[in-house]
Image (cartoon, coloured by chain):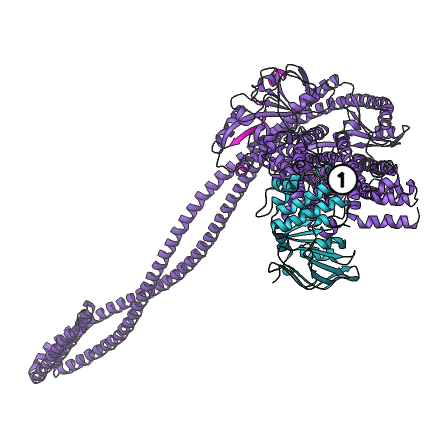
Amino acid sequence: MNRSMWKTTLREIRASLGRYLAIFAIIALGVGFFSGLKVTGRAMVKVTDDYLKEHSFYDYRLISTLGLEEADAEALRRMTGVRAASGAYHADAVVTDGSAEVAVSFHSITPGINTPSLTAGRMPVSSGEAVADARFCSESMIGTTIRLADSNTDDNLENFARRDFTIVGLAYSPLYLNYERGTTSVGNGSVSYFCLILPEDFDFEVYTDIYVKMDSDPYIYSDDYKSFKDENKPGMEDALTERAMIRYNRLYSDADGELTDARRELADAEQKLADAHKEIEDGKQEIADGEQELADARAEIAENEAKLADAEKEIAENEQKLIDAEKEIADNEKLLSDGEKELADGKKKLSEAAKQIADNEAALSAAADELNEKEQLIEAGEKELDANEKQLNEAFSQLQGQEQELLAAKEAIMAMGLPEEMAMAQLSEQFTALEAAKATLEANRTALEEARAELVSGRAALEAGRAEYEAGLEAFNTGKAEYEKNLAAYESSKDEIANGRRELEDAKLKVADGWAELNDGKTELEDGRQKLADAKTEVADGDAELEDARKKLADGEAELADKEQEFYDAKAEFEDAEQQLADFKEPTTYVLTRDENIGYACFENDSKIVDGIAVVFPVFFFLVAALVCVTTMSRMIEEQRTQIGVLKALGYSSGTIMAKYLIYSGSAALFGGVGGFFLGCYAFPTIIWKVYGLMYGFTPIRFLFDPVLFTVSIAVALICSAGTTFISCRYDLSRVAAELIRPKSPKSGKRILLERIGFIWKRIKFLHKVSIRNIFRYKGRFVMMLLGIGGCTGLLLTGYGIRDSITEIADEQYTRIQVYDEMVNFSEALTYDEIDDFKNEFAGSLSEFMPILQFSADPVGTGSIRSLNMVVLESDRNWTELLKLHDKKTGEQLPFPAPGEVIITHNAAKINNLTVGSMITFRDSDFNEYTLKVSGICDNYFNSYAYISADTYLSFRPSEPPHSIFRSAAVNIKDGTDLHEAAAAFMNHDKVASVNVNADTLDMFSKMMKTMNYIVVLVIFCAAALAFIVLYNLTNINITERIREIATIKVLGFYPNETAAYVFRENLALTALGAAVGIPIGIWLHQYVMSNIKIDMVTFDVHINPPSYLYAILYTFAFALLVDFVMFFKLKRINMAESLKSIE
Amino acid sequence: MSFVEFEHVRKVYHMGEMDIEALRDVNFCVEKGEFCVIVGASGAGKTTILNILGGMDSATSGRVTLDGEEVSSFNSMRLTTYRRHDIGFVFQFYNLVQNLTAVENVELASQICKNPLDAMSVIESVGLKDRAQNFPAQLSGGEQQRVAIARALAKNHKLLLCDEPTGALDYNTGKMILSLLQDACRKQGMTVIVITHNQALTAMADRIITVKSGTIKDMRMNDHIVPVEEIDW
């Protein structure tokens, strides 16, 4: 090739860029699809292989029924070919985050084997930290605490060293490659997620498993790996059996020794119990003593109390007495003072009396003198006036007597208490009388003379006076004696008073003493009272103490009873242990391989699905690509016929000329192929991995370059383009130049078959006739259009069909099969009474209720390792309201399983090769076997179920209590009651562990399945690309080829839309035909793809919804119209003058 | 006012960076019912005139009127309508639709205009009654050109434009085509404009316009109209 050939080649490309790009695009699409789909399966396996290598996924998992020990792991590590062996713990438990309870699988972290890949947070470093399942837990869980729920059995809780775990990170584990978390005997039977915790947080005595990783890493799923695995398995089995037996023998002898010890311990315990009994008896006696003591104390207190009361009374009396005495003293004092006063008066009277006495004495002596004088006088008078003087003395003595009388009278009066005045009045009368007497005396003096005579009489009077005087003296002496007597009386009364006073003083002193004594008594009383109160308190304390002692005794007794119970339990346990030891069997061991890991096994299936899809799509695309290349290149060569002729005429060799076209198509194919290869190898694995992320997604997909695939893809692309170019060119180049230079005679118009059917043909509008004839004018292009457009429709239909088949199964499952609203899981098996109570309690919201028991069971001897859920149905009373089991074939409701019969789900029947009437044996996790006859095969999409009646169940489990087997219930909620409110109400019931609301599950599944829209989008995109490339290319060829025709009709005055209609009517007709062809293609393709997608958990409902057909057709037309729209502008640009000027 | 008028028509083609002046200051007129021949050497600009007059191209400046309507001011839509109803074309290479029979080719035109003549009778009038159902590839050049003329005539329009209608035909066939065109003019009163490089044909025209180097060199009426049969070239 020379320079001008290169130039013309490059100019050719530039001039017909649309065509060049069309080849580029169709090749890119074909190669992209082919290589992308081809590489996806491998890339998935590769990335998984890398992942499993990186995380040291186990080769063997060793299990012994007796458990395994570190020494066993050590022994395994020493085996040749073993890289690592690590003991692991595993236990399931019901976990609560405060509200809901879910079953969680706990695994210990095993360093160097099955290492998790952390996606968030960190690994646990200290006890109580856990890493949770990255697939089912959100990052918001990090930092929260989960707790082993109270509904766990003690056996379950015993497996753990603690109950609270703080989530510190999220991770994927190679043990769980896919979404499946398995089933469990705890909670509702299905594991919600796993948790990895430190080994020390488990409380197992022995490892539950030992994981072994071998030295070599053959590629996963390869034959190499399979033979490697099989070769090493026997060695593993031998080693495991040996280790298990060592453990068995040691355990046996240990247990034997332990039993001996236990026997001794039991004897000790018995002795201790007897001692304790004795102690309690003693305690009882002590308490009785204490009681007696207290009773005595109480009696004493009562006595003392009486005494105190008496003392009080006495004191009160004494007080009164004292007060009386005081009063008496006061009275006496008064008396004394009165006496004293009297005494003083007496004294005064006495002194007066003494004076009077003295006076009287003087008077007496005077009187004696007078008497003596008078006697002398009288003796004189006697001589002279004896008579007078005698008279006078007589008178005088009379008077004296009178005065004396007066005084005496006065005294008498006074003594009589008469007033003095009266005395005085009398006295004055006396005195007056005295005066009168004096007068008389005067008269008598005179008369004395007379009375001289009388003196003798006077003498007599004097003698009388003397006698009077003697009488007076005697009176005086008597008075004096009286005075003396009075004085003595006074003195004595004075003494008496002094004595009284002294006595009073004494009495006062005595009263004071009495008061003091009384106060002392009072104080003493107070003290007594205090003492009594103290004594009472003491007694109360004694009571309390006694009560405590009693309580202690009761506690002691209770404790003793507990201890006794414990002892009997221990004894029973011991007896059990003895029995157990007698029954102790040699351990069973299992060597499991990776194939027994669900995630690993499923992944192999799933990666094969992609390979399956990869078979049909790419071939299809390559076919279309080849066809497009053929049409495009043959058209190009036809267009360039003249030029080829000219070049030939100029002497260029055929090879050189062909090189131009080979370079043209080859370069387009090469660029398209390379571009498509890399785009496909990137996009397809990425998108498909994203879709599979639902189930896997433990690690990001990596770009995988496959040189062989690359070479093959490019080679095929080149063959498609350059090969077809070569064939087209060879025909033309074989002609002589002259022939080529001459214009090729235009292809003649032809009548078509339809024209012969006159009555139809005549009815067709003229312009339509033209279109119909044009459609059939080029057979090859017609076929290509049909293929391209049909392919487009087919792809769209497949895409939508995949979506229909997958996304609707959740809906089907929960609205047509498991039609119950909620599944209530109880924390334990409920008796019928409890069930009735529950029903009654929630009668307001429940419309249907069916007790159910679910557990997982494995089919025995069918070659399948997939366990399924056994569902035990209570009765056929209302089961069809809650569970609709339709016959897979007829769609009719199946009858309730009779005793000994089982209804099995379609997928389970399929993998276990079961038909109606065949027998199947299931084994549950406790190794109970159920041999059943299949009575029906039902429709089902999620999981696998085997439905049996309660009668059937009990016939295989005679030891089960027949009245409490149901641990769950399927319920319907009354219309108008909110499902979640009802569920929350159930949850509050103490027997309810969890409630599954089907609507929520459906919602979750629907959301997951929505990811399937990625597939649909991918397919729509591919279909659009296919339709666009094919339609664009062919329309382009069509227009170029018929440019004169189009120019002509434009000249004839066809409006642009008429012109477009003239051209595109054919396109639309072909699109319609293509779509019609595409529908069977799509149906077939969809069936093919779906038959290649097999997921164990899920059965797809392979069907296409009617609207999907419509979408597929509408999209196809939309793409066709889009192409027409683009082409419309090309039509508009056709220059009539230019196009018509020269001949082709 | 004449039936066809060109006033100071100028046409410039932009070929990349170059401007090529195809027409400059073209002025001529043709009266209704005339048979007009525009003659000139290759590249003189006669096809450009025809394209502008036929509404396939538009003038850069100047005025073109047909029957009082200013064609030069039409937009592309109006031009299409103009082509549809007012103009018939006959090309050197016939430009028949290969996939349609003779009569269908005529129908293709008659389908879209207002007062079409009956396709079959037009085919008959050009003497192709027997070949009416044949595809173009089954017809000779002359027959094809007759179909083309029939297609033009069937539209029953005002003006028939012919671009070298005999250019690809032999002498006798050419003559037959020309007489057909002349008949259309004389019998149906149609205005016919024929473009040719052949001076000989001017003899049969009513009006002869000579184009040279993109402008009108001469326009004259033919005083001695010679029947087609008598023309020799």
Residue A1084 lies in quadrant: top right
* Subunit ID for the residue under disc 1: A
Residue A23 pos. (x, y %): 79, 42
The cyan-coloured chain is labelled B
- Which one is nearer the viewer's eye here, A479 or A205? A205
Residue A919, image x, y percentages: 66, 14
Q: Is residue A224 left or right of residue B223?
A: right
Quarter of the image with the C terminus of chain A in it: top right
To which residue does mark 1 refer?
A746
- Foreground of the two, A353 or B84: B84
Residue A891 seen in this snapshot: yes
**Would residue A969 be counted in the magenta stretch?**
yes
Q: State the hue of chain A.
A: purple
| Mark 1: secondary structure | loop
Query: Residue, x 62% and y 61% (percent of image)?
Result: B2
A372 with respect to A925 (left or right): left
Which residues make up the magenta segment?
A953-980
Instruction: Please say if A972 is above or below A146.
Output: above
Query: Which quarter of the picture shows residue B154?
Result: top right
Q: Could you say where residue A65 lies in the image, as x and y percent from the top left?
A: 76, 23
